Amino acid sequence: MWNAPNLRTLDFSRIVPAPMFGASIERLSLDLRSPANQADMDYFVAFQDLVAFLQETPSLRLLKLRCGTRGMTEFGEGHILPTVVLENLRELTLVLEHNRTPPRTHSFCLTSFTDRLRLPNISTLRIKLSTRSSSNNDMTNLINSFIPQHGSASLEKLHLFVLDNRHRSTPSLSVALDTYPSLRSLTLGITGKLV
């Protein structure tokens, strides 16, 4: 357990912080990607730890998460994360590396996490997806699967970027604008450089 009442920002790589009781963390940047020469981490365990941290961090205003994802399948029975309500979260950024190749450890579907998020006051959502998947060219269902469904009414800024690393592909993306009644700014990008 930590005692750091003045700490406001955390930036971790391949480490999920333990809950910090009494701290007022406002920004968390977490990189869970594995280098090519290292074994993948057990994402389910990492996200269990992340949920525990988030439940004890109601002051969080910005969350940036970088991780790999293997697709839209669920773990199934016994692998359900608890619901997390983040009343103060205003900005969520997901930087994802999507690949459908078989994982070396348990396959983790990021929607197991995003489906459990409740973000009633989120104003900005950024999803940056790099893919090598050989699945179909329409990225709509894949991108939509990562958008937390509880909080879209307050969303004012939506940024969606897809970097398609496949040869000779023409990806497409559709956005149902009526899903976001408060939307004031929309940025879409397909291919190009993820920043």
Image: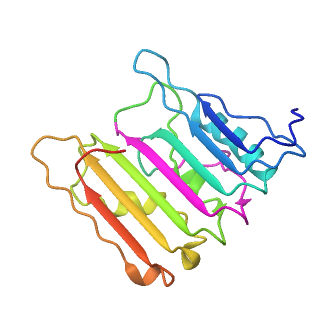
- In the rendered view, would you say 191 is above or below 49? below
Answer with left or right where residue 10 lies relative to residue 181.
Answer: right
Using the rendered view, name the quadrant where residue 19 is placed.
Answer: top right
Residue 116 image point, x, y percent? 64, 59
- In the rendered view, would you say 170 is above or below 148? above
87 or 3: nearer the viewer: 3
Answer with left or right where residue 64 lies relative to residue 163.
Answer: right
24 or 78: nearer the viewer: 24
Q: Which residues are magenta?
A: 74-100
Most frequent secondary structure within the magenta stretch: loop
Q: Is residue 77 magenta?
A: yes
Quadrant in which the C terminus is drawn: top left
One can see residue 109 in this view: yes
Answer with left or right where residue 36 lies relative to residue 43.
Answer: left
Q: How many marks?
A: 0
What residue do we see at 68% from left, 38% from top?
10
- In the rendered view, would you say 20 is above or below 112? above
20 or 133: nearer the viewer: 20
Residue 186 image point, x, y percent? 37, 71
What residue do we see at 62% from left, 54% from top?
62
Residue 34 image point, x, y percent? 48, 26
What residue do we see at 27% from left, 39% from top?
132
Using the rendered view, name the quadrant where residue 15 is placed.
Answer: top right
